[in-house]
Image (cartoon, rainbow, N blue to C red):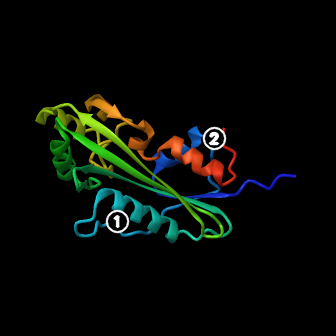
Amino acid sequence: MSAPEPALILASASPRRRELLARLGIEPVSIVAPNVDETPKRAELPRVYARRIARAKADNVAPDGALVLAADTVVAVGRRIIPKAATADQARSCLEMLSGRRHRVITAVLLRGPGGCLSERVVVSVVGFARLTPARITAYLETGEWQGKAGGYAIQGRAEAFVRFLSGSYSNVVGLPLFETAQLLRAAGCAVP
């Protein structure tokens, strides 16, 4: 007789992460929005930041005998972390910075088991944007897709037309690298098709 499949808690307020998990045929038993201060530390590197925030999200959710899946996605230009856009002006600034250049999208995915054991993957995708005219940026801002998005854009929406180059995982840029997430879940005993 095989052991029962472990219950999974998603430590994320992101509807995109829930949608991406559904593509794997995974439905968390619970979704908890962790209360975590996501302010980068002074001179903190993007990869270090993503790992720290993913761990803080997992720590903020009590496992209660379940698996806790947490992730954090960061957009970075060089050593600089590009913020999640809270205002249209911030989104404009992000898009102006990304216009005509490459940037990295880094996601740390962390799975905490009932005994506190941790498994983690860090995935990096490289995205190259076309040059964006002020009119194109304004038109995109009017869609509202930028709201709360790292880097001020959503690749799964109209901003996909900005992408002239993508190396790595598309689902990582959306917010959860599915290949690596599936590996972590399978290793923890979840049935992932």
Q: Nearer the viewer, residue 16 or 110?
A: 110
Say which amino acid is labelled 1. Glu
Which residue is labeled 2 in the image?
25
In this view, the residue in front, 17 or 45, is 45
Taking the image as shown, residue 38 lies to the left or right of residue 13, namely left
Q: Residue furthest right?
A: 1
- Check residue 38 in the rendering and tell me which mark sits there, or answer none: 1
Which image quadrant for residue 3? bottom right
SS of the residue at dot 1? Answer: loop
The answer to whether residue 51 of the structure is visible from this angle is yes
Q: Indicate the position of residue 64 as horizontal and vertical percent values.
A: 65, 70
Q: Quadrant location of residue 112?
A: bottom right
Please name the residue shown 27% across and 69% down the image: 41
Q: CA–CA distance between discs 1 and 2?
A: 29 Å
In the picture, which quadrant includes the C terminus?
A: top right
Q: Is residue 172 above or below residue 10?
A: above
